[in-house]
Structures are given as structure tokens and as C-alpha cells.
Amino acid sequence: MARCPAGHDSTTDDYCDVCGAPMEAPPPAPRAHDCAACGAVRVGRFCEECGHDSLTPPPAAPPQALSWHVSVEADRAYFERVLAVDGPDASAVGFPEFCPPRRFELSGQRVSIGRRSRSRGLVPDVDLTGPPEDPGVSHSHALLVASAGGWSVVDLGSTNGTTVNEGEDPLRPNVPRPLADGDRVHLGAWTTLTLRRG
């Protein structure tokens, strides 16, 4: 005859036929912890999500933190400068009546800027397809490239060029230009991207 943990004699050896308690206490459930590498809930030594071994230090943060973003807006002052120098097709382009600001988080090593094109299979990371649509933005206009501690902008040989911080001279194509927090990248007839950290 078996004896249950509560002290009853039982004719069965899996559950007490007097009180119904399991004859052996179940092993304690493993404790759940947060993975130090990815933050997922981990049970046991290795994380099921990323495979990190909890007995080793977490990996160092990537050099380019994901805390950068660009805000995109229709910039009246930039538009007026384009009109003043009689930019390409300036007289045919109007300033949009309504263009809410947009925000794009920056991640990875390269972030493409332009307008979507189904025929070319282009889907830029910072997609400036309208409405309203700035006709001066090329489909493959520019690129933001992660660099040590920040970002650089590269004009990809766009039709109407790219300027930075109200500069008058367009960037040379395919030459990176380092940016700092708060720098403004101008492209098209009225589009301005402002780089922000945090």
C-alpha cells in the first residue's frame, strides 16, 4: 500500500484514493527570466528566440543604435529658395496645401530615400510617394548610410540634386556627406528631412 504526502494509505500509486493528491510532488516548474540579449522570456539556460547562453555576458550593443529617425515635411522656406533660383520646372510646381509631417525610424546600415516605382521594382525605406507628391524627388534619390556614431547622406545622381542645411551647392553624387543631429536634408521642390537622435 502506498502512502500519499498527506499521510493517507492509498491502494493506487499515482493519486491518493482518499484525498486525490498526487503521490509524488511534481518537480518545481522552471523559473522564467528575461533574456539579457533580446529581452524574450527564457526558461532554462538558452533563449528560445535568439539562442543566447545565459551563462555568457550579453552581446555588446550594435555601434549604430536604433535611436535615430528623420522627420519629413513640406518646407515653405526651402520651396521659396527653389523658386528664387528658378529651379527645374519651378513655375509648374506649387507648394502643397496640406502635407502632414511624417516620421521614419532609421535602422540597419543603409536607408534608401525616394519615390516608389512599381515598374522598376523600387520601394525606398523613406518612401516619399504622395499625396501630395513632390515631383522633384527622384525614384532613387538619396541614401542615408550609417557611420560611426551617426549618419551620412549620399545623393544617388538624382535629377534635381540634394542640399544640406540651406546650402546652395548640391552634393556631389555618390560622395557621402556626414550629418549631425538636427541637420536638414533638402530634396525635390519642397521636401525637407530633419535628422534627429532619440
Image (cartoon, grey):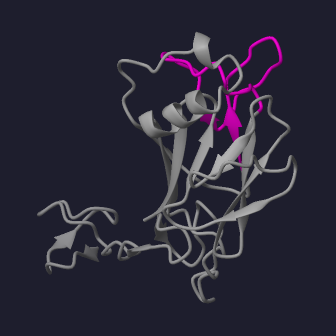
Q: Magenta stretch: give its range.
A: 111-140
Which residue sits at x=53%, y=18%?
Answer: 130
Which residue sits at x=47%, y=64%?
Answer: 40
Left or right relative to 84: residue 12: left
* Residue closer to the observer: 91 or 173: 91
**Quarter containing the C terminus:** bottom left
Magenta residue check for 23: no
* Residue closer to the observer: 127 or 18: 127
The answer to whether residue 15 is above or below residue 169 is below
Which residue sits at x=59%, y=60%?
Answer: 49
* Residue closer to the observer: 29 or 176: 176
* Residue closer to the observer: 154 or 85: 85
Magenta residue check for 115: yes
Secondary structure that dominates the magenta span: loop
The answer to whether residue 93 is above or below residue 17 is above
State the image quarter where residue 29 is shown.
bottom left
Q: Residue 33's spot in the image, x, y percent?
A: 41, 75
**Quarter containing the N terminus:** bottom left
Q: Residue 138's spot in the image, x, y percent?
A: 73, 27
The answer to whether residue 178 is above or below residue 59 is above
The answer to whether residue 31 is above or below residue 192 is below
Which residue sits at x=12%, y=63%?
Answer: 19
Q: Residue 57's spot in the image, x, y percent?
A: 60, 89
Left or right relative to 22: residue 111: right
Badge count: 0
